[in-house]
Image (cartoon, coloured by chain):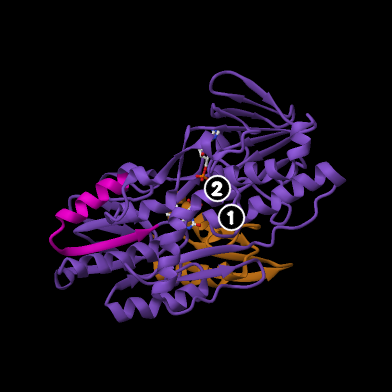
Chain colours: A orange, B purple
């Protein structure tokens, strides 16, 4: 999967529930198998979004914080 | 100094009147001028719609003549803005007129946007407009029992409305002796029953006590009006006999069309309330992108801070205070009990157990609002 392209969803500066709503909208338009990387500066969302991904059943690929911005990577699986 | 206020709702009206009082001398001496452009000659007290939907207020009680609410020095035109020329410091209106300004304030509000969820508009009852609130009440009166789903989208104005309508519906069905035939179910987009954590901590046990079921992390995807079911993005379903919804909102179309902000929300400085990147454009109320509640009280407290600052800028050339994020919301916990949430950027709310006294205070405020819009309260 070396060629995999990642679509970045930049929701920095937006607060709960902004980042989650943004991710939901982008995932709706994505194809199955696509990887999205959500950027969020909101701590509450960094906790909520993985719980949401888990409930929906998409694949959570990872979450890391760099300079106050969380990078949450998810693969659309259905 | 020409001050142009676009929008004659809660934020615009409170600002205009407050400013007119502060700048009495300058307005009479020709040193300042306040003009308001709005889309309607009537002013609606939107929080009253909650009561219209339950047959407890008549729509006619919610309106006043906008001109009559304004201080006489304010020039007022019903002529909605269609184009914002921020670089030229002017706007163009529906009638084709151009208004120039030194300071522009945008307070055009927000609206429900059910179109984002297929089937929602056709199958749900709403109470965020006069027409829909009246229709919802008529549906409620005919309702004999079954599953009632209150489905919430985000963002939306009035953060407490989802809880209030749910608790008030509970009492409505109780009073009509229908409680044993009705099953109330509540859905909410994020991982708890309310966006404010302490409000969720209060509401969740209330739901449990009253036997109201709920599903969190439920984002409406589509409504199937034949199968009578709401499907979520998360893959779950909420079957209903009566669907009541607070759909996700957008700002006004004119904001998005003019490129002032995505989905009609204008990027705004949280303390100074200026539009980001513009020193002479300010934003009030629902149309900001601020991470605080879209509520009348937000618009009110923002207007107070902005009026003080604009007057100070005219008088001493500098603003004098920051908006601290203050919001105050009543929360109706049924037909005759209420609590409230007060918070700002620093301090979260901490709702107390509901009482009758707070409910009566809210009922009184439903009338007192007009004094507040005039700037007397
Ligand atoms: C059912 C319901 C219950 C609510 N309950 C509460 C409550 O209990 N407590 C609370 O604090 N808040 C409550 N609210 C929210 C509150 O009403 C809003 O947050 C508040 O009105 C926002 O004020 P605003 O000035 O931003 O916008 P608005 O009051 O909506 O005013 C917008 C104005 O802009 C004008 N306009 C629109 N487009 C244009 C244009 N192109 N050019 C010029 N003018 C334009 C409109 O005519 C209007 O006058 C409730 C709202 C609803 C619908």
At which x and y percent is residue B100? 71, 26
* Residue at 58% over, 18% down: B96
* Residue at 29% over, 56% down: B56
User: Is B132 positioned to the left or the right of A43 in the image?
Assistant: left
Q: Which mark is residue B373?
A: 2
- For disc 2, the chain is B
Q: Nearer the viewer, residue B253 or B168?
A: B168
Q: Quadrant of residue A64?
A: bottom right
User: Is A16 positioned to the left or the right of B302 in the image?
Assistant: left
Say if B363 sits above or below B28 in the image. below
At which x and y percent is residue B114? 37, 46
In front: mark 2 or mark 1? 1
* Residue at 34% over, 50% down: B127
On the image, numbered disc 1 is attached to which residue? B377
Residues drawn in magenta:
B132-152
Q: Residue furthest right?
A: B316
């Amino acid at each position: 999967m070396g060629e995999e392209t990642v679509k970045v969803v930049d929701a920095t500066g937006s607060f709960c529930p902004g980042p989650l709503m943004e991710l939901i909208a982008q995932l709706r338009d994505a194809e199955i198998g696509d990887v999205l990387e959500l950027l969020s500066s909101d701590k509450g969302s960094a906790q909520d979004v993985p719980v949401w991904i888990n409930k929906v059943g998409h694949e959570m690929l990872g979450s890391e914080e760099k300079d106050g911005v969380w990078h949450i990577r998810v693969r659309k699986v259905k | 100094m020409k001050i142009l206020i676009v929008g004659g709702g809660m934020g615009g009206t409170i600002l205009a009147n407050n400013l007119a009082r502060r700048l009495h001398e300058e307005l009479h001496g020709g040193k300042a001028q306040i003009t308001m452009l709005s889309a309607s000659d009537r002013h609606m007290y939107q929080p009253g719609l909650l009561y219209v939907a339950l047959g407890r207020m008549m729509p006619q009680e919610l309106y006043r003549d906008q001109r009559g609410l304004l201080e006489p020095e304010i020039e007022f035109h019903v002529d909605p803005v269609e184009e914002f020329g921020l670089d030229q410091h002017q706007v163009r209106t529906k009638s084709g007129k151009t208004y120039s300004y030194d300071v522009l304030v945008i307070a055009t509000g927000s609206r429900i946007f059910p179109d984002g969820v297929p089937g929602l508009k056709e199958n749900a009852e709403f109470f965020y407009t006069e027409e829909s609130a009246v229709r919802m009440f008529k549906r409620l009166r005919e309702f004999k029992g079954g599953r009632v789903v209150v489905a919430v989208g985000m963002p939306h104005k009035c953060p407490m409305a989802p809880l209030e309508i749910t608790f008030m519906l509970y009492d409505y069905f109780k009073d009509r002796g229908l409680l044993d035939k009705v099953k109330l179910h509540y859905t909410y987009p994020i991982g708890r029953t309310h966006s404010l954590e302490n409000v969720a901590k209060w509401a969740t046990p209330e739901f449990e006590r009253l036997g109201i079921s709920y599903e969190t992390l439920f984002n409406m995807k589509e409504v199937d009006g034949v199968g009578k079911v709401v499907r979520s993005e998360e893959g779950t379903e909420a079957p209903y006999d009566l669907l009541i919804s607070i759909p996700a909102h957008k700002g006004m179309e004119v904001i998005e069309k003019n490129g002032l902000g995505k989905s009609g929300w204008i990027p705004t400085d949280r303390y100074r309330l200026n539009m980001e990147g513009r020193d002479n454009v300010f934003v009030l109320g629902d149309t900001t992108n601020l991470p605080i509640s879209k509520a009348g009280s937000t618009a009110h407290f923002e207007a107070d801070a902005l009026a003080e600052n604009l007057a100070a800028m005219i008088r001493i050339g500098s603003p004098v205070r920051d908006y601290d994020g203050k919001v105050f919301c009543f929360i109706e916990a049924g037909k005759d009990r209420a609590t409230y949430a007060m918070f700002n950027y620093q301090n979260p709310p901490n709702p107390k157990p509901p009482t009758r006294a707070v409910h009566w205070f809210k009922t009184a405020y439903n009338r007192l609002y007009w004094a507040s819009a005039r700037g007397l309260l």
